[in-house]
Amino acid sequence: MADVLKLHFDVDGDDFTSAGEASADVKKRLRLMGCDPEIIRRVSIAMYEGEINMVIHAGGGVADVSVYSDKIEIVLEDKGPGIPDIALAMSEGFSTAPDTVRSLGFGAGMGLPNMKRYTDVLHIDSKVGEGTKVTMIVNT
Amino acid sequence: MKYLHSVTLVTDKCHGCTHCLDFCPTEAIRVRGGKAQINPDRCIDCGECIRVCKNKAKKSVYDKLDLLSKYKFKIALPAPALYGQFDNLDDLDCVIDGLYSMGFDYVFEVARAAEIVSEYTRRYLKREDVPRPVISSACPVILRLISLMFPSLADHVIPVMSPMETAAIYARREAKRLHPELTDDDIGVCFISPCPAKVSYVKNNPTNRRPLIDAVVSMKEIYFKLISCMTREPDHEHVSRSGVVGLSWATSGGESAAIFNEKYLAADGIDNVIQVLEQIENNALPNLEFVELNSCPGGCVGGVMTVANPFIAKARIQGLRRYLPVTRNFAGDRDSTEVPEEFIIHTELKKRRIGTFSPDEKLTLQQMTEIEALSEQLPQLDCGVCGAPTCHAFAEDVIRGNASLSGCIVCSFLSNDEEDVK
């Protein structure tokens, strides 16, 4: 009896327009499983923001989603520049996104705060120069 | 209760070519035994399969005009898109006169009701206690799509009745005013529709009341009869009462323009609509007040029961709008800031208005895990030969017990190949 559904995605850092595909894929599966709409919404917002972050700041990365009977865990891992001050990065409106990205409507400094707001657990492991690993859990 | 559909298959004409599989936005179609099948739990009546079928094997079911013969007083509700169907039309009155000549006792333009709905929409947008962005309720495909795929957005949909329903209320009231002896059952109201989705919407009466509309006919079907009744010289009395706002509802962006606020988004074409809804659900479109979504390309003029190409119809409507007043119809209670009870749909959108996913469709965690595992072993060509739109959908069918793995001819071919090499 399998008690976990594992999904793996490569998030392409070169193609900005494809950001959000992985979260849309996850959403589709959760829908098929008759997951509560509010849970689906929270998972998709948190994962979408995380995906966008990886594309903007880290040139892409990988996303691993595990669906358990009582929770959904999303792990996003990249080999980007890392976050020097996580507390500062968590504050609303703080952004290091370049102007080119801002002109597209991203980089408002709401990514991490939203990820925290819509999940039950947000854990960030980051080393400057090595990369960032974000773990999020939504209890179902 | 089972949801009734108006998009159906003509089995004899279907060659089982799999072309439609690629275009169905909800993966509702499978080809089994050489014929397409539409899963009624997933179909949203968008008509994409009708649009793309090369063998004309998909069709819309709609009412025949004869259905109205049992009513003493017959009312026509022409959709705004109807005005875009005629070449060289220079007066809306020609169309309305034509409908009277066809035998209708009264004509109420849906474009008029649309102007009232626009006024109610502006009132509703002043409320701060409703989730933003507010989503239009006019296109029934969108309602069902939201119910099936984006249920978390159900409370964004404006609960105000569509122009079609509003027109029916006004028309019935006017008929009774003109002929006080008429009862509700004497009056037959007929909507002249650009699309099958409106047919389904009416058939599955979303309100708890007596149906407002008794028949929905296709623009295509009545076209030649109507055109033969239309005269080039309409009666001198001006009968059309529509303004720019009402006419503009026929094309994408028209409804939004009438909210008099630039914070809107208008999307048309089912794929664009789905992308926009994904973004709204992701909270990625802040600062939007209103979202107008039309399943058909170009808006209602792109419906599969219209005659003219949507862009040609759009150009004609632009011409007809010239010199018309912006709005000619106003809600009865002009100073109010509320939407009257009569025009509110109270029944909860996701439950009654458009049906929901059947519980049989729901997959367990175990099944989903098996589907992912099986899907990974499939060729990922999404060729459709197995009868499913994608390899993933095929894996889903196999695990649900609706298809056999041997249906994948690429898998069989590759495994034979390997044996040959050995």
Image (cartoon, coloured by chain):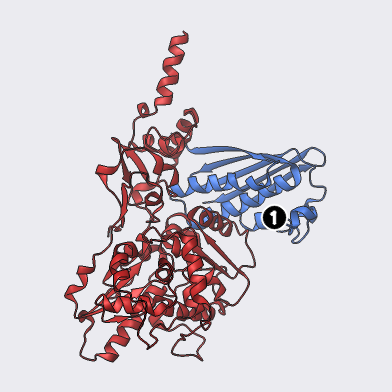
Chain colours: A blue, B red
Residue drawn at (37%, 46%), measured in percent from left and top?
A: B53
For the residue labelled by badge 1, is the local secondary structure a helix, a strand or a loop? helix
Q: Is residue B382 above or below residue B340?
A: above
The location of residue B421, given as percent across then percent down, is 47, 9
Q: Relative to B331, is B365 above or below?
A: above
Q: Is residue B258 left or right of residue B101?
A: right
| Pick the front one: B167 or B55 | B55
Q: Where is residue A84? Give x, y as percent.
A: 82, 47
- Label 1 amino acid? Gly
Residue shown at the point (48%, 35%) measured from the top left: B372
Q: Quadrant of the N terminus of chain B?
A: bottom left
On screen, residue B298 versus residue A10, left or right, reads left
Along the viewing direction, whichever of B106 and B16 lies nearer the viewer? B106
Q: Is residue B61 visible?
A: yes
Q: Position of residue B190 (x, y in %)?
A: 29, 73
Q: Residue at x 44, y 73 (%)?
A: B159
* Depicted B29 relative to depicted B98: above or below: above
Spot occupied by residue B411 in the image (x, y as percentages of width and height) = 43, 24
- Write down the quadrant of residue B410 in the picture: top left
Q: Which residue is mark 1?
A: A111
Q: Is residue B223 above or below residue B174?
A: above
Q: Residue furthest left?
A: B70
Tally the marks: 1
